[in-house]
């Protein structure tokens, strides 16, 4: 069983951080904090503390001044459930999961998770299964399949779904074995360039420009975290790609928001112009998806020597599933978490964990990698590739061990009232979770409210 401090040490070593810097971190609290045996608080505190410490290393590189970092596990868990606590004008949560999303029993006694939160995925599943867009009709269609056959068929059609496996089944799977050979995260040198300072201003990333080409949770968490330390983060989405409204708001804190359609030559050229002025390029499309548009890591490093290219994927860059579409809840399903959570609660069906721990953890790991790559660029120059995946992150979370948490009450919004703040935005009055990392000299905060997609021109602020 891994303590929060030991988990932090694992993350910091994987990221290549200076070991002596860990002396400046204080962690408080302990699992369990949620009704699960999975050590969600430990994972959350470790990656949030590592990212905060990386921000202080950027600051120390530029100013010569060190500062301390404090993270409490309760605040870290609230940050990992931030989308649950978001409110607009004190109303109900902005949206909920699609009724088609979830677990379905198959004809051979297994369970399959259908990921149907985005409209085109829901329509794709309905079309493939030949059913009506109701849960009852989809359940009847799924029941005619064997679990493994359905997982293979849906993913073969480009539709996100996963067979619910036990932990032992996953560990024996060829893709799990491929993931086990990978590190938690990678920071790889892409090419040479002169050293560059890490920003210029009163916050660690003031003056640093980040292009954020991500959606849903993990990738946007990376950009939101960099924004909390002062970076100018420009979210670039395409008008034809769907998004979930509550996540646009919650994970858009601190960001500018523009739209470009990379299918159009002129918009691709505009993105190249933005790359030329960027310090960080973060994307969460499937491995290779942007290469055909001319934005592979090597392409971007040629466009902008000194860039830090961050890539997040579902299943990683190695193994038979490397090109498969995936989401955090599917990682929970295929890797044993959902089976364990359901069985541990005495249910005859799988159940997701009470936080999207893999998504949020991967986002913080990506931000930590970006920060340390920027610090390394300031020290020795170079362009860098930061590589993170949900599958690799999930493997690390699983390896942290278990704690007896089934009897713990769920963390309600009232329980985290002291961890919420409010701001005005074009959406209305937002109430949101504050950053969990407490830096002694440069407190993390979001200087910009969340805005609707496409609010800003695709240009860097003056």
Image: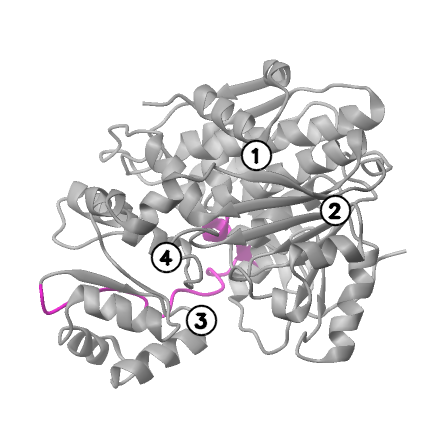
Residue 362 placement (x, y as % from top left) = 50, 44
Q: Which residue is mark 4?
A: 320
State yes or no: discs 3 and 2 in contact (Cβ < 8 Å): no
Check disc 1 and report its element: helix, strand or loop.
loop
Q: Quadrant of residue 367?
A: top right
Residue situated in front as seen by the camera: 372 or 290: 290
Q: First in sequence: mark 4 or mark 2?
A: 4
Of 96 and 120, nearer the camera is 120
The colour scheme used to paint the residues is one colour
Residue at (38% x, 58% y) in the render: 321
| Residue mark closest to the camera, 3 vs 2 | 3
Residue 258 image point, x, y percent: 72, 67
> Does the CB distance between marks 1 and 4 fall below 8 Å?
no
Tell me the magenta residue range.
Answer: 82-108
Residue drawn at (42%, 64%), measured in percent from left and top? 325
Quick one: label 4 or label 3, which is nearer the N terminus?
3
Rounded to the nearest angstrom, the CA distance separating label 1 from label 3 is: 29 Å
Marks 4 and 2 sit apart, C-alpha to C-alpha, by 42 Å
Q: Earlier in the sequence, mark 1 or mark 3?
A: 3
Q: Which residue is mark 2?
A: 447
Residue 199: % across, % down: 83, 38
- Depth check, mark 4 against mark 2: the one in front is 4
On the picture, is 433 further left or further right than 125? right
Residue 5 in view in this figure? yes
- The question of residue 85 being in magenta is answered with yes
> Would you place residue 205 above or below residue 139 in this image?
above
Residue at image position (66%, 54%) is: 297
Q: Residue furthest left?
A: 108
Q: Residues within 10 Å of mark 3 (few under 14, many from 20)?
A: some
Q: SS at mark 4?
A: loop
> Which is nearer the N-term, disc 1 or disc 4?
4
């Amino acid at each position: 069983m891994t303590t929060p401090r030991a988990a932090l040490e694992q993350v910091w070593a994987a990221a290549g951080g200076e070991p002596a810097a860990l002396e400046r971190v204080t962690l408080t609290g302990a699992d369990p904090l949620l009704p699960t045996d999975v050590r969600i608080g430990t994972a959350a505190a470790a990656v949030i503390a590592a990212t905060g410490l990386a921000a202080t290393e950027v600051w120390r590189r530029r100013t010569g001044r060190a500062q301390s970092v404090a993270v409490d596990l309760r605040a870290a868990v609230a940050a990992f459930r931030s989308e649950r606590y978001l409110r607009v004008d004190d109303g109900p949560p902005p949206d909920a999961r699609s009724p088609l999303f979830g677990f379905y029993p198959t004809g051979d006694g297994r369970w399959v998770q259908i990921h149907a939160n985005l409209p085109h995925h829901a329509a794709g599943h309905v079309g493939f299964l030949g059913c009506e867009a109701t849960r009852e009709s989809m359940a009847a269609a799924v029941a005619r399949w064997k679990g493994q056959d359905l997982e293979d068929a849906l993913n073969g059609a480009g539709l996100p779904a996963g067979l619910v496996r036990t932990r032992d089944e996953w560990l024996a799977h060829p893709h799990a074995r491929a993931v086990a050979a990978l590190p938690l995260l990678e920071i790889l040198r892409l090419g040479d360039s002169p050293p560059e300072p890490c920003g210029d201003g009163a916050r660690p990333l003031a003056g640093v420009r980040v292009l954020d080409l991500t959606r849903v949770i993990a990738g946007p968490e990376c950009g939101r975290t960099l924004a909390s330390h002062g970076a100018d983060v420009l979210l670039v989405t395409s008008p034809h790609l769907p998004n979930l409204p509550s996540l646009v708001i919650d994970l858009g804190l601190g960001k500018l928001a523009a739209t470009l359609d990379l299918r159009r030559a002129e918009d691709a050229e505009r993105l190249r112009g933005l790359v030329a002025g960027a310090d960080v390029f973060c994307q969460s499309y499937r491995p290779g998806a942007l290469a055909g548009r001319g934005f592979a890591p090597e392409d971007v490093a040629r466009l902008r020597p000194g860039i830090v290219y961050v890539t997040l994927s579902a299943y990683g860059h190695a193994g038979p599933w490397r090109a498969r579409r995936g989401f955090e809840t599917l990682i929970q399903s295929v890797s044993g978490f959902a089976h364990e959570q359901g069985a541990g609660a005495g249910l005859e069906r799988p159940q997701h964990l009470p936080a999207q721990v893999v998504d949020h953890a991967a986002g913080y790991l990506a931000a930590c990698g970006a920060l340390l790559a920027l610090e390394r660029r300031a020290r020795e120059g170079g362009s860098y590739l930061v590589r993170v995946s949900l599958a690799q992150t999930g493997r690390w979370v699983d390896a942290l061990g278990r704690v007896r948490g089934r009897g713990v009450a769920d963390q309600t919004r009232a329980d985290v009232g002291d961890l919420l703040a409010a701001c005005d935005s074009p959406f209305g009055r937002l109430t949101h979770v504050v950053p969990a990392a407490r830096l002694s000299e440069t407190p993390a905060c979001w200087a910009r409210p969340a805005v609707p997609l496409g609010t800003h021109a695709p240009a860097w602020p003056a």
